[in-house]
Image (tube, rainbow, N blue to C red):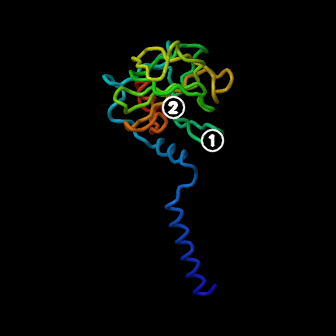
Amino acid sequence: MTRFGWIVLTVFVLVAAGFAAMTSFGTARHRRLDTAVTQPLPSSPPAASAALLTVPVKGVRREAIVDSWNDARGGGTRGHHGTDIPAAAGTPVVAAAAGTVEKLFQSNLGGTTAYVRSLDRRWIYYYAHLSGYAPGLHEGQGVRAGEPIGFVGDTGDAGPGNYHLHFGLQRMRPDERWHQGIDVNPFPLLAARGQGR
């Protein structure tokens, strides 16, 4: 190759490398998940007066909760952003902390879901795969920690018979809507111990 050819090739490689360094491949959702995976545990816990959240499934002991954060989902196309808590179908699901029911929603992945916003509007507590809601639960309703939200189910992509609550935690800005927060691993605040792995 001539000297001019080497110069052209070098310029092309440098431009391509610069472009690759400035480009994030994939969808906006994937960029958000990548950010969430590295998001540190908040310095001040979302529970108003204690460092621990109420276990959101009746009868489940903290010691039984397993850290499933970032486990492969969707055939390895995404990481799991929450804590799965297995329980028998129909087991009561309760509020992990005080807040306001911001959204009741049916989704393909989460199935029957509830989004409860903390009183200071800085956190969303996400409850998914419910078989149904507690009687009378409605958007705008205030709930205290331990109050009924719904019942353990297998709706959405949980899979038939895979009864569990998917519990998620999202850090929010006060002006963000129920689906716009940054995912944070809830496991340490549920299980009273550090990251599971």
Q: Give x and y (percent) for residue 69.
A: 51, 34
Residue drawn at (53%, 65%), measured in percent from left and top? 19
User: For the residue marked with disc 1, what is the amino acid?
Assistant: Gly
Where residue 186 is drawn, which disc sits there?
Answer: none
Q: Considering only vertical position in the picture, is 163 above or below 45?
A: above
| The N terminus: image quadrant | bottom right
Where is residue 21 drawn, in percent x and y? 50, 62
- Asked if 146 appears above or below 122 in the picture, the reply is above
Answer whether residue 169 is visible to the viewer in this image: yes
Q: Is residue 127 left or right of residue 157?
A: left
Residue 128 image-quadrant placement: top right
Q: Which residue is mark 1?
A: 76
Which label sits on residue 82? 2
C-alpha distance separating marks 1 and 2: 16 Å
Which tag, 1 or 2, sits closer to the chain's start? 1
Q: Judging from the image, what secondary structure is the residue with disc 1 in?
A: loop
Taking the spot 64% from the left edge, 23% from the top edge, the residue there is 162
Q: Amino acid at mark 2?
A: Gly
Residue drawn at (52%, 14%), measured in percent from left and top?
134
